[in-house]
Amino acid sequence: MDTAIHVVKFGSGLLTQGGSVKSDIKLHTERLLKQYKRNGLIVVSSGAVAIGGRIARELGYGEDSLGAEQLAGMGFAPVFSAWQEAFASHGVAVASTGITHHQLGGGRWYHRLGNRSEKRVLMRILRENAEAGIVTVLNESDMISNTELMRLATGGDNDGLAARVAIAMSAETLTIYSEHGGIFDANQRLVSTVDSRSVERLRTMLADRAKSAAGKGGVLAKADAAWAAACAGVNHVSITDVNGKNITRFVIG
């Protein structure tokens, strides 16, 4: 029987502060292992751009001299190292790979010629890691696919990536963790459930909200990613805070 796949995504606000990785990553790791154990866990991690920005400033680069693609490339190693250290303290191995939406089936028509074989290889690696009890930490490869990424209908940045991985892996769950948890309406009331009757109304409400300061994905991107996963058959999809107090669930019906 195949190992159940659980995809979790962490936003920049949960992982970074002042351009450094928060010590909270150790608590996140403990919660993940308590809830999902080690088998089948795939972590999609933001934070690379924020950390890359701090590194760039320390090296004397001007405020706008580097794009998000370069900053992400500079910042992912510290993010991965933090996850690796946190999981290692519990005796859990961690693997990392750069991944693009092109590998999952996105991109222009001439990119799609090699997509099927690339996707098969990628899915095999993720599946083998899952079955071996190795946690895979992924980050969208901004340096390769940033232009196409911003046009995708499944959400921006790592929100869309998490959804696409969950769909491609036929995951049991997709959980998008954010600093403030689930989605709140204009009156600051928690939207506990999003379904086919309410999703368009929700999208309209979110469309004008500003994107988060640290990452490229805002609340609308998270909602679009979550809804895409739910529509594709991922059984349990939610946006939540790390304590599970403010949860928005996405269900078909």
Image (spheres, rainbow, N blue to C red):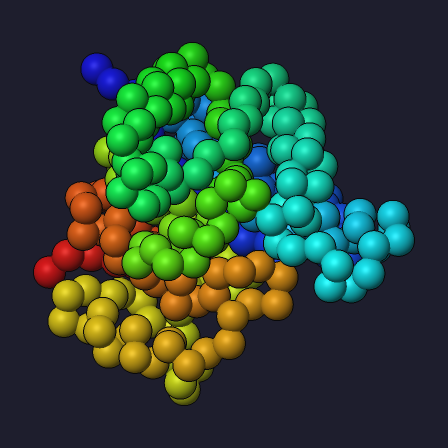
Q: Residue at x 24, y 66 (%)?
A: 194
Q: Nearer the viewer, residue 127 or 191?
A: 127
Let me know if residue 242 appears in the view. Answer: no
The quadrant of the picture occupied by the C terminus is bottom left
The quadrant of the picture occupied by the N terminus is top left
The picture quadrant where one finds residue 40 is top left
Residue 121 in the image: x percent, y percent? Answer: 35, 19
Residue 58 in the image: x percent, y percent? Answer: 87, 50
The residue most toward the left is 253
Residue 77 in the image: x percent, y percent? Answer: 68, 34
Q: Does 13 sit above or below residue 233?
A: below
Let me know if residue 196 appears in the view. Answer: yes
Q: Residue at x 24, y 78 (%)?
A: 201
The residue most toward the bottom is 187
Count of numbered badges drawn on the protein: 0
Q: Residue at x 65, y 41 (%)?
A: 73
Q: Nearer the viewer, residue 61 or 1?
A: 61
Q: Nearer the viewer, residue 246 or 5?
A: 5
Residue 235 in the image: x percent, y percent? Answer: 22, 43
The residue most toward the front is 110
Q: Is residue 202 left or right of residue 87?
A: left
The picture quadrant where one finds residue 39 is top left
Q: Residue at x 57, y 18 (%)?
A: 93
Q: Nearer the viewer, residue 31 or 239?
A: 239
Q: Does 50 sit above or below residue 145?
A: below
